[in-house]
Amino acid sequence: MIEETIISKAIIESYLKDLLNSVESDVIIGGAGPSGLCAGYYLAKKGYKTLLFERGLKPGGGMSGGGMMFNRIVVQDEARSMLDEFDIRCHEYKPGYYIANSLEATACLTDKALKAGLKIFNLVSVEDVIVRENSVNGAVINWSSVKMAKLHIDPLAFKSKIVIDATGHPCEITHIVETKSGGKLLTSSGKIEGEKSMWAEVAERLTLENTKEVYPNLYVCGMAANAVFGGPRMGPIFGGMLLSGKKLAEIVMKKI
Ligand code: 48F
């Protein structure tokens, strides 16, 4: 005999236990694209209490869609070893260009990150941050459906030592901080410099250079890093995203 109320209690209790245990953490990541998942994987693997809030139903961000809905991604030599780290199969298309299935890549990143201990809360958006004495101290979250339904419902606040903006092109968390801090970001103008048009080679290099702190205790990785610091976009080559997440995890580990 199957009792429906046991199913309900199992789901509610298990989820709420995770949620309650997450109110204070080491690191909060906004966005489950490749860079956010990668950063979360390396941090969780080293034992840092790390949460990831993802607005959408599924993790993966822009990775699963590949290039123009052709579900393939390209990764260059520099990030080849990361495909192995995540058990993502690939083959060399031309010297230095590796091609992988974008659905497999997304699934493998998600699987490894979860199993390393990253807590992923999907369908939840970061809508604000906690700020104390000009330093980010956590994220303010709400169900994504609340915004979609245009409901006026107050959010909840989760504290962390570090917040990572991995929200991709719109760099949403940095936008919030820029707006509310009066434009005092650690960029050359103090504001978001804005993403530039596609130039894959330069973009891949700059993604790594731009992976850093943008406001005290707020860090950017992936496409958000280029959008914030004024780098170009790169299209469906993903080595920079993976390396950026890894680099940021290392920076954050040194900081805390
Ligand atoms: O855009 P996205 O995949 O970020 P990424 O890790 O990778 C970029 C590439 O996919 C691609 C590219 C490189 O080849 O140019 O675009 O930098 O994933 C960002 C995720 O953040 C979520 C969004 O739903 C997506 O899954 N997101 C955006 N804003 C919020 C958010 C928010 N405010 N709160 C929570 N999640």
Image: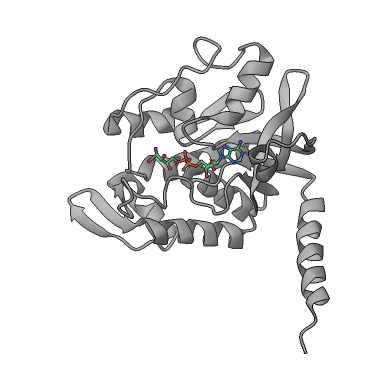
Q: Is residue 82 left or right of residue 17?
A: left
At a point 68% along the width and 33% down the height, the residue shown is 127
Residue 213 seen from this side: yes
Residue 253 image point, x, y percent: 62, 40
Residue 209 relative to residue 32: left or right: left
In the image, residue 72 sits, relative to residue 174, either above or below, namely below
**Residue 163 sits above or below residue 84 on the image:** above
Q: Residue placed at 17% from the left, 50% from the top? A: 95
Specify the quadrant of the image occupied by residue 128: top right
Residue at the outermost left position: 94
In the image, 19 versus 155, the foreground residue is: 155
Q: In this view, does 229 lie to the left or right of 160?
A: left
| Residue nearest the observer in this picture, 71 or 19 | 71
| Residue drawn 54% across the image and 36% down it | 167
Give residue 89's quadrant in the image: bottom left
Please state the horizontal and vertical placement of residue 118, each as a whole percent of the image: 63, 54
Is residue 210 visible to us here? no
Work out which residue is located at the far bottom of the displayed protein and give it.
1
| Residue at horizontal 29 percent and vertical 33 percent from the top | 200
Please state the horizontal and vertical placement of residue 148, each as a whole percent of the image.
63, 40
